[in-house]
Image (cartoon, grey):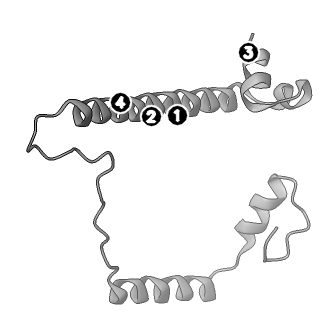
């Protein structure tokens, strides 16, 4: 039953499914559940807004489906300070841990750029 779920919803083959650990499966299930809840909530909001707008009393404003989000400008001084700290750390420390992470994931050919 588990394999059927992964095959139908994500297109996994039997080998790909077998390669997943129980922890990876749990994270995938949780992400899938979060997506279903988010989609259901968005559908509820869309239907509610459409129903209200279609049946609203005269002279009442229509509800907007999506609210505008205000855009905050970044503080360039803080960004520059953070970048300076990062540059100092990169100059002082080696990047051996990056190579270890890539090697642990079977990406031996990484040369410091895009893998």
Q: Which mark is residue 2?
A: 3
Q: Tell us which disc is closer to us: 1 or 3.
A: 1
Which residue matches tag 2? 38
Q: Is residue 40 left or right of residue 64?
A: right
How far apart, in angstroms, are the residues tagged by discs 1 and 3?
Answer: 18 Å
Q: Which mark is residue 35?
A: 1
Residue farthest to the top?
Answer: 1
Residue 46, position as x, y percentages in the image: 36, 35
Which residue matches tag 4? 47
Quadrant including the N terminus: top right
Residue 38, position as x, y percentages in the image: 44, 34
Mark 4 packing: few (<14 Cα in 10 Å), some, or many (20+)?
A: few
* Tags 2 and 3 touching, CB below 8 Å: no
Mark 1 packing: few (<14 Cα in 10 Å), some, or many (20+)?
A: few
Q: Is residue 90 left or right of residue 69?
A: right
Image height check: is 29 above or below 85? above
Circle 1: element type = helix
């Amino acid at each position: 039953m588990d394999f059927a779920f992964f095959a139908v919803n994500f297109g996994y083959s039997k080998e790909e499914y077998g390669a997943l650990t129980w922890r990876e499966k749990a994270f995938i299930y949780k992400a899938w559940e979060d997506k279903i809840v988010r989609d259901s909530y968005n559908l509820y909001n869309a239907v509610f807004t459409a129903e209200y707008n279609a049946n609203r009393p005269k002279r009442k404003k229509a509800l907007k489906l999506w609210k505008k989000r205000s855009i905050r400008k970044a503080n360039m001084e803080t960004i520059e300070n953070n970048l300076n700290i990062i540059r100092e750390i990169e100059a002082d420390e080696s990047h051996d841990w990056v190579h270890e992470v890539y090697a642990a994931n079977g990406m031996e050919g990484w040369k410091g750029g895009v893998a």
